[in-house]
Amino acid sequence: MLRKLINTVIDTPLQTPTAFPHPFTKKETLHLSWLTQLTPCFPISAKNISILYEPADFYNALLEYGQKAKERITIASLYLGNGDLEKKLVKSLMDNSQLSQLKINILLDYARGSRFANNSRKMLQPLLQQSSSCTLSLYHTPTLRGVLKKVMPNRWNELFGVQHMKLYIFDDTLIISGANLSNDYFTNRQDRYFVIKDNNLCDFYDGLIKRVQKFSIKVDENDSEEFGEYGSPYEGSKNNFIEKAGDGIEKYLAEVKVDQNNHKHEGFDTWIFPLVQMGQLGVVQDVQVTAKIFGDALPGTRMNIATAYFNLTHDYVRSLIFKSKAECNLLMAHPEANGFLGAKGMAGGIPDGYTLLARRFKAQLDRQCQQNRIHLLEYIRKGWTYHAKGLWYYSPGSEKPSMTLIGSPNFGDRSVLKDLETQIAIVTENPELQEKLHDECTRLYKLGLRGDFKREVPHWVYAMVFLFKDFF
């Protein structure tokens, strides 16, 4: 039913004209004005956006902003690791001179955050014990319940849906990324990282996280658990829980959109559109926008699309092959750059699974004579894994991108149907920011090789992909 709902949303035409004024002034951005009808619009000066390129830059930014924050720190991530770098990060928060008056909100995933004895919640106990204004919440999917919850082992219980948003707020500064808070993401796991200074955008995401915390599980300084105001996510009526949680998020998004978009926002050169996807709760904003961007791309457009895990949904494939007129370059992880390489058990076959999915996509391109318009590349960098995702959108006739998507979704069924996700669309008319976007894109794609999908795939991986394609 959920998949049918999402398909219906994607195929439903947008309402015509114009409930909200759009702010764009240049030809390269005017055809994107429909964004103001679907999502809140935050105007910003391009000088308040900076791009980080390396994991160490991301880690150092977290340390710096965490130490300087004076009023609030709000974090949403899948989990916090338990190594030395993670301990240093927690200690930097505890050493903040304003800790006694800092409001700290942390949202992680319940399954991943509770995995192992030395888990995320244990790592954060010292901070919770030292700061009375620190709140730790763990999102628990309403799908994992009953017998499945009792028998499903760690790691496998994450297949049913996780909190996957990656947002790091320090006062009026947002770092948005696809990166988690663990050693690999601080050292040799390539992702994307945008630092944005804007109080209104930070307020928006702070509010979104607080609304998710309303239906998440609170963990106190003694590691005791308390259900949110909607009750248990895994006991009682699943439908009632989903309806209340989803309605709360939808209402929040609608209220912010009305408040933000009733104004034309003149005098700015850049606009940020937050996109939220919580498929299990019926919130399908991001998939509608992403499918329209893919499918409506005009002749002469170039789209560089990146995903850590190549497993495009059927609807995204349909949009790219049968609707889009753009030249597309799809960058994915080479098996040697896949974080699952060498994993124990069935998870070790996931890199081969992505090879198989890419091979099938390429075969579809060949059948539709689209192989000269859509190209597949694989990122490989010795000693590194790859986790970057998003989009760089080059309008017809433009040599620099006028829009990018940056955030947590991977354009697959997990992102659309199971996990809590968010990314932002940044539309800019500023030449300097367009140059920075182009440089970021070029840095990643120069490490992409033309995909070779003739590699041998073990026979058992075919069965794994058939049975579990929607889960990875």
Image (cartoon, rainbow, N blue to C red):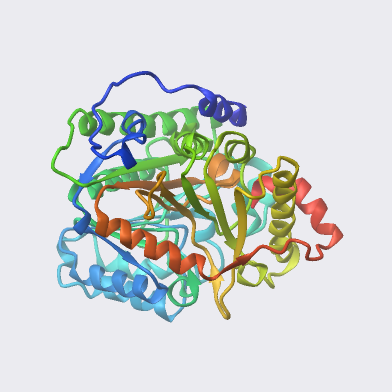
Give the vertical position of 166 relative to 337 (above or below). Answer: above
x and y percentages locating residue 387 in the rendered image? 52, 63
| Residue at 48% across, 49% down | 303
> Can residue 232 be seen?
no
- Of residues 429 and 34, the one nearer the viewer is 429
Q: Quadrant of the N terminus?
A: top right
Give the vertical position of 179 relative to 39 (above or below). Answer: below
| Residue at 41% across, 73% down | 55
x and y percentages locating residue 166 in the rendered image? 41, 56
- Of residues 170 and 196, the one nearer the viewer is 196
- Of residues 447 and 6, the one nearer the viewer is 447
- Of residues 105 and 367, the one nearer the viewer is 367
x and y percentages locating residue 78 in the rendered image? 47, 58
x and y percentages locating residue 269 in the rendered image? 21, 47
Question: In the orientation shown, which residue stands out farthest toward the right?
Answer: 459
| Residue at 51% across, 52% down | 305
| Image quadrant where residue 224 sits | bottom left
| Image quadrant where residue 427 sits | top left
| Residue at 37% across, 67% down | 125
